[in-house]
Amino acid sequence: MRIILYLGKGGVGKTTVAAATAVRSAELGYKTLVASTDIAHSLADSLNTPLAANPVEVAPNLWAQEISVVADIHNYWGTLQDFVSGMLRNGDRINNVVADELSAFPGMDEIVSLLHINKQAKERNFDRVIIDAAPTGETIRLLTMPDTFRWYAGHLSRGRSKVVNALRPFASRFLQGPAEVLEALEKLDAATGELRETLSNPEISSYRVVLQPEKMVVREAERAVSYLGLFNYPVDSVIINRILPESAEEGPFYAQRRAVQAKYLEMIENNFSPLPLWRAPYYAHEVVGTEALSRLAHDCFGQADPGDIFYRGALQEIVEKEDGRYLMRLPMPFVTGGDVKLRKRGDEMFITIGNFKREMILPTVLAKRRAGGGSLQDGILEITFLPPEPVPEVA
């Protein structure tokens, strides 16, 4: 069972690559589902066929669906929502606290989308599930939901003995069905823990960032890879989409655009090392329908199976030291030795090692600290971040 999630800036590029991957996977004989979790669905347009909230067979070995978060929330959360809306029969302060806790669950829609993915993983109805995820920022928030949800669920579970058990003898007077809600909450907590294991298992799940060779898109992709690494979600490659082809009769506009792309293509090669890079051309025609998507898959992945795992290993490791420092380790297996020069600006880190240059986006916990120096040993770059400087007291 393989789950591949495609992330990227909003637009059709990510959807097209996800659909092309699914089409090629089906051609190779794998029973494949491609599903969209993006609120602004465009998967049906890419496949050029109507889709529904449930999987629809669109070609041999290929099913597709546009997940309806509204329908899923009703299926997963009906009991909990009914409980929250009609929980109180008086204005008791303790009941208000319980009501606030339950109604404040963050990311209900995100959780049910992920539970839908996990359902496919558990039931193994398909050999491969390809996810056209929401735009990068929304997907990063979605992927942090299992951890956030479990914190809330644990918070409520710890308070169960103090609050809910105390109220249980008076359930008929104060609460409507607490036993069912607590049971549903515990089941959701267990399912979410299982979901977290599925999403972070590199033998099951892979994350791929689709980008175009443009500054803002590259920066957003760097942030995505950085935060995916923080949560130990396995990124296995980067797809560079819409690369302009060479032309013997290009005009000034075309030549300038190709020069801009060449600049950012070099940046992508440096900044996303050691991840494999796949390149998809910019076509003169629309990439719509299974035939055009199949061609895109061949042009992008060549003879490789796009369902394979293309990279194994952590892209970064952040270790907190006892003295308050942080140590960041970055694999750089293809960089030869040399003096490490670091320059930091906000959440951007500029790294120079000999002729090698890399720019990266730092996680928030490191962006607020000064870099204390770096060294490259055995293909691993280690950068030290110093403890925050004390804020002077105001007299």
Image (cartoon, helix red, strand yellow):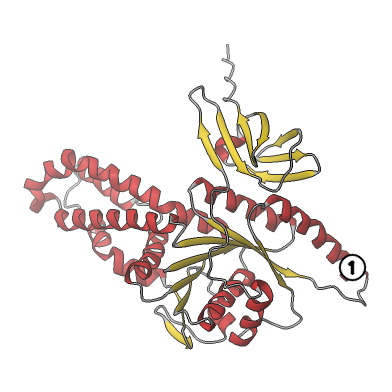
Count of numbered marks: 1
Q: Is residue 381 above or below residue 82?
A: above
Q: Position of residue 243 (x, y in %)?
A: 75, 69
Q: Is residue 329 visible?
A: yes
Q: Is residue 158 left or right of residue 276?
A: left
User: Within the image, what quadrant is residue 74 found in?
Assistant: bottom left
Residue farthest front in this picture: 378
Q: Is residue 237 above or below residue 340?
A: below
- For image coordinates 77% across by 44% down, the residue present is 356
Q: Position of residue 319 (x, y in %)?
A: 51, 34
Q: Is residue 176 visible?
A: no
Front residue of 290 and 146: 290
User: Within the image, what quadrant is residue 14 found in?
Assistant: bottom right
Q: Position of residue 347 (x, y in %)?
A: 65, 40
Front residue of 261 and 322: 322
SS state under label 1: helix
Residue farthest top in this picture: 395
Residue farthest left in this picture: 169
Query: Which residue is the site of mark 1?
Result: 255
- Label 1: how many Cα within 10 Å (few below 14, some 14–19, many 20+): some
- For image coordinates 61% across by 30% down, the residue present is 384
**Quadrant in which the C terminus appears:** top right
Q: Is residue 145 above or below residue 372?
A: below
Q: Is residue 17 left or right of residue 93?
A: right
- For image coordinates 30% across by 58% down, the residue present is 191
**Quadrant in which the N terminus appears:** bottom left
User: Within the image, what quadrant is residue 327 found in?
Assistant: top right
Q: Position of residue 318 (x, y in %)?
A: 53, 38
Q: At label 1, which amino acid type do we have? A: Ala
